[in-house]
Amino acid sequence: MIGRWAALVLLLLMPAIWVQAVAFDHEHSVWTDLLQQHVTNDGGLSQVDYRALLDEEAKLSVYLESLSRVSHQEFAGWTEDQRRAFLINAYNGFTVKLVLDHLPVKSIKDIGGWFSSPWKKRFFQLLGDERHLDDIEHGMIRKDFDEPRIHFAVNCAATGCPPLRAEAYVAARLDEQLEDNTRRFLRDTRRNRYSATETRLELSAVMDWYRDDFSKNGQSLHNFVASRMGTTPSDAEAIGNRRVRIRFLDYDWSLNNR
């Protein structure tokens, strides 16, 4: 009789035990492990060893499947930073998956055709629906969060893109990580530079495409980049001057391959 009651109690507890066992990992540990092994960063430029990642595609799939299992209800119960970190990591993880599925490619823009875009290709499940990458960036992150620094965190697999961080974004350090990526990219003179002699700012095309995001709440594009590009107070003051001309540089769409 005691054994029967113990079995019944265990049966009743099994759903709770199962939920606890598959609770979402907000440290995104598997993703961090993959990034640390296969991504190198040189200042604001990152390179990804996609060929080596192909050998670990099963591990990547485990991580991406953990993202796909998250429901709307579960997602809604998280903190804002947990939601933002989840979406940034999802964008980057599924972008890597898209590239792996189409190797060899010289550019992510080669995925698709004349009338299709890699960012409009529905190839994964997230929050209960079939999604494409633009759903995450524009339909979720930009729509729901007033955070221009996400443009330096989501990675489009291009050399001209802000770096793919060699670790997952996590809620506990999200502000620090976003600020670090932003500064590293803006101080990379291959993509952004200031000429005091010519009184000119040369900025990545990213700053042009999303200029409205960087100019919200009374802030100008000059102000946004000044404190992050300037390595001294006098440099920051000079860059922040609205009379400084801005020229946007060509974007390098070649694959950020190592």
Image (cartoon, rainbow, N blue to C red):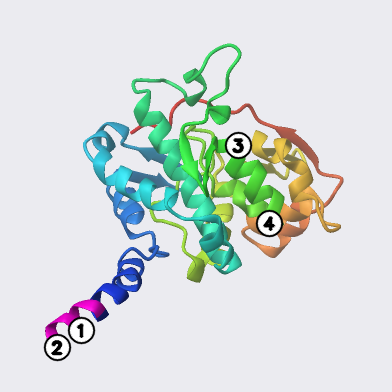
Residue type at the position of mark 1: Trp
Q: Which quadrant would residue 50 be assigned to in this image?
A: top left
The residue located at (27%, 31%) in the rendering is: 51
Q: Are marks 1 and 2 in contact (CB under 8 Å)?
A: yes
Provide the secondary structure element on which disc 1 rests.
helix
Mark 2 highlights which residue?
Answer: 2
User: Residue 240: x, y in percent?
Assistant: 78, 54
Q: Is residue 215 left or right of residue 92?
A: right
**Which dot, 3 or 2, sits closer to the camera?**
2
Considering only order in the chain, which callout, 3 or 4, is on the residue closer to the N terminus? 3
Q: Name the amino acid, label 3.
A: Asp
- Determine which of the numbered discs, if any, sits on residue 134 in the image: 3
Which numbered disc covers residue 114?
none
Q: Report x, y in % for residue 16.
A: 35, 73
**Which residue is disc 4 drawn over?**
145
* Residue range highlighted in magenta: 1-8
Residue 90 lies, with reference to residue 15, above or below; the image says above
In front of the other: 200 or 20: 20
Between the residue at mark 4 and the residue at mark 1, the CA separation in whole angstroms equals 50 Å
Q: Secondary structure at mark 3?
A: helix
Residue type for callout 4: Phe
232 lies above or below 248: below
Q: Measured from the top left, where is residue 29 in percent x and y? A: 33, 60
At label 1, counting other C-alpha atoms closer than 10 Å, the crowd grade (few under 14, some 14-19, many 20 or more) is few
Q: Is residue 14 magenta?
A: no
- The alpha-carbon separation of the residues under discs 4 and 2 comes to 54 Å
Secondary structure under tag 2 reads helix
Write down the residue under mark 1: 5
